[in-house]
Image: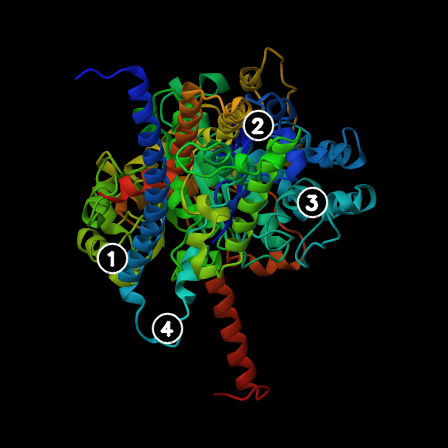
Amino acid sequence: MKLCIVGIGGAGGKITKEFLGNEDLDSQLLSRITDAEYLSPGKIKGIWLEADKNDAKNLKPHFFGDMMEGCYPCYYIPHDAVDDGCAVHVAVREKYGYDVKKQGFVRDAQYLKAIFEIFDTDKEIQSIVAQTIKKESMEGNGANNGPLSAPNPIFDSAWNSIRDFTTLGEGECDGILFIVSFGGGTGTGFINPIINNIRNMGKAEYPVFTLGILTEPGDYADTAQFSESSRRNLAAISAIYDLLTNGNGANGVIIVDNETLLERYGNDYISANKFIHDMMQPLVAARDYPEEVPPSQAVAHHALKGLSKPPIFVPLFASLPRSSNPEEALVKKALSEEGRLFGCTPKKADFAFVFCRGFIDSDKIRAILSRETDIAPGSIMLVRKMGEGNNEILILLRNPYGGDPNAYKKVGTLENRFCTVITQALQYIKEHPEYLFYEGKQEEKDKKDNKPSEQVKLTALSKEALKTFFFGPDGSSQTSGFVFELNEARKRLRNGEKPFFRDPLRIFLRESKVVAENQGKGSEMDKDEIARAVDKRIKELIEQGLLKGP
Amino acid sequence: MNLDLSTVMDILFPAGTLLLALLLILAAVLHITNLKRVYKLMAALRHEKEGSKNESKDYSKGGYKALLYQEMTIPQGINFTALALAAWIMLFVALAYLYLLVPTILPFSYMDISDLASTSGGFFIFGILAACLVAGVILLLDKLPQDHRELKLTELYSFYPLSKFTKKMIGMTIITLCISVLISAYVGTIYPSYSQPAELLSLLLLLGSTGILVMPIFREAWEARR
């Protein structure tokens, strides 16, 4: 298992930096003599995707260089695939009001979602893209888009910047780990479109995981980004909603609560980022036990086993000095409040991945974890690595919630945390509906470095699409729309049901008969629905005598 | 009991030499023990894998060991590896300069070949010869099969996690070892005169550098004791 680390947005970049440090001695003179290559721990490769070029250039200390200048480690600005004032830029702005060149400070998940869906659905825009955008910027080194893919300059170029690190290109990474902050600007907006784009390009089986840091409830930690808590919560829940409802999206969403990190590290973000790096080492580091090297594909397969939607993984982490028989202490520490990085009820988990570092007995770990959480030993997948110091354990509990109607009232449960986020998001929508359409005074709050940001002026077409997305076709939020789905999700959380997010939503629906066929079934068919449709059709063909029955 | 300075110096040099020898021998033993311990632990922890899958594999030729070493390997970077290798070669060159250039502890020395030793490039040739000899041995060891990687000096640090600071320290030993060589060369230059403090200083630098070079082995052995 070798993952390509892709940080998206400011926070994603800072965490990715921790993973991509050079193991070798940094000496330009020596490197010239030895022809040394940049070497990250465990030979990890990665990249930082950022929408704001100034942020990327000014991140201190200067760690990332511009990919376009051949630097490594590097950042890439996907928006640069579209030239300022080019035909595509103008056409999208005139028809929809969206500025595809707008930087990451449009702090919601819908902005980039809408842009992705415009390229995905609008034949006219697709035609302009095909005619005007340089082919190489979208296709990279001669690789072609998949059969399902519409030309999408921003997200195609983003994927091209990643692909060469992966086994789908010339690299060795057999999976991708996206690192984002849920509630920020770029990461929140970018994560779903980029995953959708990878999947649309026909890479349906390629393992893709997301590590997301959920924004904290208060306003104190994000003053630098000048964004109020409820707004960040709407952005966060929108991104998480899309990730968890897209059956063809990520293979799992590992979620860390920033509140937990703030409790431990206060505003010391450097230590918090370092902790996230350390916590992920049992998963991403090298030195696997011989014959126990799992390909990412196997992990991805187990992550989704028995599910039609991507699960939430809550990480539990413990690190203890080396000792004999460390298993009991490690598992217990990881399961304790101290080890949990997100609120959860471990006994409610239906599957667990355990990644260990050190000399660890897997049978003991399995038995202890099963005893402590009631997860069947057969539902625990264990991966061991030789350590580099302390014994460490990272447990990823799959969907550790549900089944308890009172859980949402208890602090420290997943239900409680998500109910809080949803409530704040709904409150924001109720109090500032105009902000959803980038109207009112909200843009003034987006000033960065004292430079006023340009106001987004959506067209009637976009406004109508967004209105339908948020409030349903009748605008009442009583039967459909994002607000309706959030209310339903909160009810499910309160009733102890899982999953709490179910139906995927789009802002711009696909045209053509595919949409018509899918009406009444939701806008996208998940794997189960496809399987049922195929079974039905086979049955019909058997009945018609065109196929031989079993 | 009254000890004069020259007596102390007379004791210090052999004692330092003994310490240096012990340090190197102990490091070699500990390195092999460290890897053997890992091998044993891994064999014990493979219990759940025993059965159908592994029975079909032949590990009698050290196949599992080679696989274990492959997985254990930590790439440390080519810059570091080059510096570390240079440092080890320098260590043996410095040893040769200290003990073989002039008769110190051993009864024979390079000075016995006075025709060569007294030429203008005599000391340099000695150093080059020592370096080539060490490099030859290192290269020879490097040809050992994959299940004997514990004996390869080129891969010594591949088995230990090293911090950037440790790597820098190991790289810096080249400088201290160079100083040690220069001091030993000075002792050779003034031969048959004799400078005990210079010899001791050279030995001290050698000891310090050796300590840094073998530190990761000792640290691992210390941590494994828990």
For badge 3, the amino acid type reads Asn
Check the image and report above or below for A135 versus A24. below
Task: Report if the CB atoms under discs 3 and 1 are less than 8 Å apart.
Answer: no
| Disc number for residue A136 | none
Q: Residue furthest top?
A: A450
Q: Quadrant of residue B36?
A: bottom left
Q: Which residue is mark 1?
A: A366
Subunit bearing disc 4: B
Q: Residue at x 31, y 31 (%)?
A: B15
For badge 4, the amino acid type reads Lys
Q: Residue at x 27, y 49 (%)?
A: A402
Depth check, mark 3 against mark 2: the one in front is: 2
Q: Quadrant of residue A89?
A: top right
| Disc number for residue A152 | 3
Q: Which residue is mark 4?
A: B53
Task: Say which label, 1 or 2, has the lower sequence index.
Answer: 2
Task: Report if the CB atoms under discs 1 and 4 are less than 8 Å apart.
Answer: no
Task: Report if the CB atoms under discs 3 and 2 are less than 8 Å apart.
Answer: no
The residues bearing labels 1 and 2 have C-alpha atoms spaced at a distance of 40 Å
Task: Report if the CB atoms under discs 1 and 2 are less than 8 Å apart.
Answer: no
Q: Residue furthest right?
A: A131
Residue A298 in sight from this viewpoint: no
The residues bearing labels 1 and 4 have C-alpha atoms spaced at a distance of 20 Å
Q: Which residue is mark 2?
A: A63
Q: Position of residue A337 (x, y in %)?
A: 23, 36
The residues bearing labels 2 and 4 have C-alpha atoms spaced at a distance of 45 Å
